[in-house]
Image (cartoon, rainbow, N blue to C red):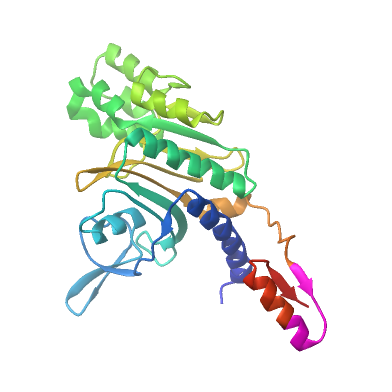
Amino acid sequence: MRKGLLAESEKLSEISRYLRRTFELWGYREVFLPAIEEYSENLRKGTKFAYNNGFYVIKPDITSQILENIKEPPEKLKLYYISEVLDGGIRGQWQAGVEYIGGDVTKMATEVLLTVITSLEALGIEEFYIDIGSLKVWEKATEDVKEFRKEIYRALVRRNFEIIERLPISVEKKEELWRLFNFWGKESGYRKLDRIVEAVDDERLFIDFGTVRPLPYYRDILFEVYSPELGKPLGGGGEYTFKGKPAFGFAFDMGALSRLFRKRGDRNRKKLRGELREVFAGAKRLVRMGIPVEVE
């Protein structure tokens, strides 16, 4: 057994309990996915292997796995998951997230962002901020330098403007991209994005056009969640399209959450003691009423 596994598992279990409750309060239902999928170019991440002349993927990216498995989605679908994801190796990252498929993008984005905010608050994590950006804004800004889009997006992902600075484009274009690269505020002039920020109405949400996530299925709006206590994102998500339907989703890095989460214990748990038959009869009644118990 790996050292510290039980302590780590206990913490992740408690985090999962708070997340499940919050996700379900927002109307999402849990989906359970197989650990192994037949290989498809649509599946992201995961660890690939061959078996009986076939190719398979262990624990791929959950969003791509959901999309691969749903052949005919209903008009509206709201799912959540808690699962481990591999990225080519044997050690994975535990993730928890939601997918909202089929709805108005502004409404879906607003609800998903509020799900993120209320989930963190449920965990007792209050000090965080969310940067939200737009791919469409960058598509428009790079319309006249399409041949350099790959390098420009690489600069965004790495947060390294020097990559753009080295490109053979005009000084005026570099200055325009520099302003966009460094934009951070509450109102951008891009109405779609401004409406989402206005609807969420939280002082920890900011427009940051330097925010770009390196997953190919995102279409426009995307975001990342940060804490000043960590040097890595707590999670992120964005807008995508599934079989012609607009969709929006996000995922938490549960390892990052576990570093911020402080175990609270269950103060409402009733402690019972006494003669075995009577004490367990009482425990059974309380459990049926939804009251947590501990028989001492």
Quadrant location, the N terminus: bottom right
Residue 100 % position (x, y) = 36, 47
Residue 30 among those drawn in magenta: no
Q: Position of residue 114 (x, y in %)?
A: 49, 39
Q: Residue 216 placed where, x, y %?
A: 27, 44
The span picked out in magenta is 270-280
State the residue at coordinates (68%, 53%).
Answer: 262
Q: Is residue 278 left or right of residue 143?
A: right
Q: Which residue is at the far right?
A: 274
Vertical arrangement, residue 91 with respect to residue 249, above or below: below
- The answer to whether residue 97 is left or right of residue 149 is right
From the viewer's side, name the closer residue of 160 and 31.
31
Determine the residue positioned at 56% across, 73% down: 2
Q: Who's the residue at 43% across and 32% down the image?
A: 132
State the residue at coordinates (57%, 64%): 13
Is 142 or 83 nearer to us in this picture? 83
**Quadrant position of the C terminus in the picture:** bottom right
- Residue 39: image quadrant is bottom left
The relative height of residue 2 versus residue 69 in the rendered view (above or below) is below
Q: Nearer the viewer, residue 121 or 276?
A: 276
Asked whether, in this view, residue 231 is left or right of residue 215, the answer is: right
Give 107 or 238, whichever is nearer the viewer.
Answer: 107
Instruction: Examine the rendered structure and indicate whether residue 145 appears above or below residue 226.
Output: above
- Give residue 173's position: percent from left, percent from top: 28, 15
